[in-house]
Image (cartoon, rainbow, N blue to C red):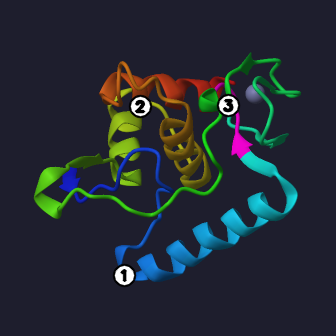
Amino acid sequence: MKKIIMLEMHYPKKMNPDKKHLQEAQYELMQGIIEKTNLNIVTCGMCSAVIIHDRDDEEVHCPYCDFGGEPSDFPDLIFRPSPRETEDEKIAIEWSIQDVYHQAKNDEVEITRQQALNVLSLLDRKHDATLGICWDTISMYINMEING
Ligand SMILES: [Zn+2]
């Protein structure tokens, strides 16, 4: 486990600070789509599905998970890339495949590389932000991955 530089939580994980001008271009293109169509492309705040809705909608309903709410409950698919934080104003904790192997060994279970990658992906996408990621959650997802 080691600290790495982190981008704001709701930004894409792989946002490269050197490519900010390209990300801004994406944002501008998206604004163009919104202006031309009056439609916005957002993500469901509950299940993360990508949804299109009319910009005038006062309520948005997710057809995939049945969640409904105000447009603010459905984050834009493409964010304006303007993290104001400087490098010393943010932190992130990084977990690697080695950590998954380490925990699997502690739990005395065999794990393949693909299973370990699946565990990492689950940790990334499914972890409860209230609890965060710790050795116990890694153990839990290893168990889920191996035992279904
Ligand atoms: Zn949904």
Vertical placement of residue 16 versus 126, above or below = below
- Name which residue lies at 59% across and 67% down: 27
x and y percentages locating residue 16 in the rendered image = 41, 73
Beta carbon at label 3 within 8 Å of ligand 1:
no
- Residues at marks 2 and 1, CA–CA distance in whole angstroms: 32 Å
Q: Which residues are magenta?
A: 42-47
The nearer-to-camera label among 3 and 2 is: 3
Q: Amino acid at mark 3?
A: Pro
Q: Amino acid at mark 2?
A: Ile
Q: Do tag 2 and tag 1 residues touch (Cβ < 8 Å)?
A: no
- Name which residue lies at 81% across and 27% down: 62
- In-image side of 109 versus 88 (left or right): right
Q: Quadrant of the C terminus?
A: top right
The nearer-to-camera label among 2 and 1 is: 1
- Residues at marks 3 and 1, CA–CA distance in whole angstroms: 31 Å
Q: Is residue 104 visible?
A: yes
Q: Please identify the dominant SS of the magenta region.
A: loop
Tell me the SS state at disc 1: helix
Q: Amino acid at mark 1?
A: Asp
Instruction: Give the mark nearer the N terminus: 2 vs 1.
Output: 1
- Name which residue lies at 53% across and 81% down: 22
Q: Is residue 1 visible?
A: no
Q: Give the residue number, with chain letter if any, for mark 3.
A: 71
| Residue 63 on the magenta segment | no
Q: Pick the residue in front: 19 or 30.
A: 30
Q: Give the residue number, with chain letter if any, for mark 1.
A: 18
Q: Pick the residue in front: 8 or 132.
A: 8
Vertical placement of residue 29 versus 120, above or below = below
Instruction: Give the mark nearer the N terminus: 3 vs 2.
Output: 3
x and y percentages locating residue 111 in the rendered image = 53, 42
- In-image side of 87 versus 110 (left or right): left
Q: Give the residue number, with chain letter if any, for mark 2.
A: 138
